Amino acid sequence: MVLKVASSFLHALPHAAEDRILIAHSVGIAARVVLDPSGRHAVIACAGAGVVLVDIEKRMSVSVSLPSGGHPVWCAVHPEHPLAAVFARNLQVIEFSKKKPVVYTSTFSSNTKLGGEFTPDGKWLLFADTDRIYGMNVRSRIIRTISTGAGGTENQPLRLSFDGRSALIEREGAVVEFDVDALVAEIAAGPEVGRCYKLAEATADNE
């Protein structure tokens, strides 16, 4: 299955049949395309065009306009639930289990672009800017940070190792590794820097 993101920009989606064309959707330049763990949804962060959610089975796409905070540069999907995080200089969380996806926007913002991933157990969303590492408790939507500076390189998001045990950031040309369990414990005890609140509902467009 192939998702056509722009007239000259193709992304092959893993875990999909190669003999089916999914949806042609002109959304501009895609900063990142990810699948949810079920393989049923694709999330596309589009520079200058917000976010597009694609229901692969229903062959339906949903365009989601985001508030100010810069063009989306990174996105991540929850390991179990139909939930996506979209990063620019702030954070939006999108629930796309309902007919009309619901957008939650954060009161937290950064001077540099953010990026990160959900922990394997789905309880935390870890992300970083150039100053610090942050974590959002998925259940409470409260964002906290560690007490000491541990930021990375701009435009280089926090990534998790394949087994999910390590969080990796790039700093001064080197990769710095953190134990995820220890990092989450430190963030959970750290100061609150923001929360995500419900913003709006998106409008679905059948393709």
Image (cartoon, rainbow, N blue to C red):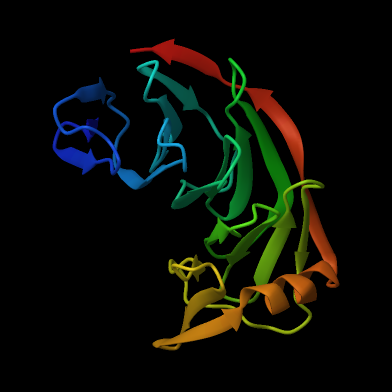
- Which quadrant is the N terminus positioned in? top left
Give the left or right position of residue 129, taking residue 187 as reference: left
Pick the residue in front: 90 or 180.
180
Q: Where in the figure is residue 9, as x and y percent of width and height?
A: 18, 40
Q: Where in the figure is residue 189, as x and y percent of width and height?
A: 86, 72
Q: Where in the figure is residue 85, as x and y percent of width and height?
A: 57, 46
User: Residue at coordinates 59% horizontally, 78% vertically from top-left?
Assistant: 151
Q: From this viewpoint, which residue is outermost toward the top?
A: 206
47 up-or-down from 179: above or below: above
Give the left or right position of residue 46, taking residue 201 as reference: left
- Which quadrant is the C terminus positioned in? top left
User: Residue at coordinates 40% horizontally, 36% vertically from top-left?
Assistant: 39
Pick the residue in front: 44 or 16.
16
Pick the residue in front: 52 or 79.
79
- Locate residue 166: give its quadrant: bottom right
- Locate residue 94: give its quadrant: top right
Count of marks overlaid on the render: 0
User: Residue at coordinates 46% horizontally, 41% vertically from top-left?
Assistant: 36
User: Residue at coordinates 38% horizontally, 20% vertically from top-left?
Assistant: 57
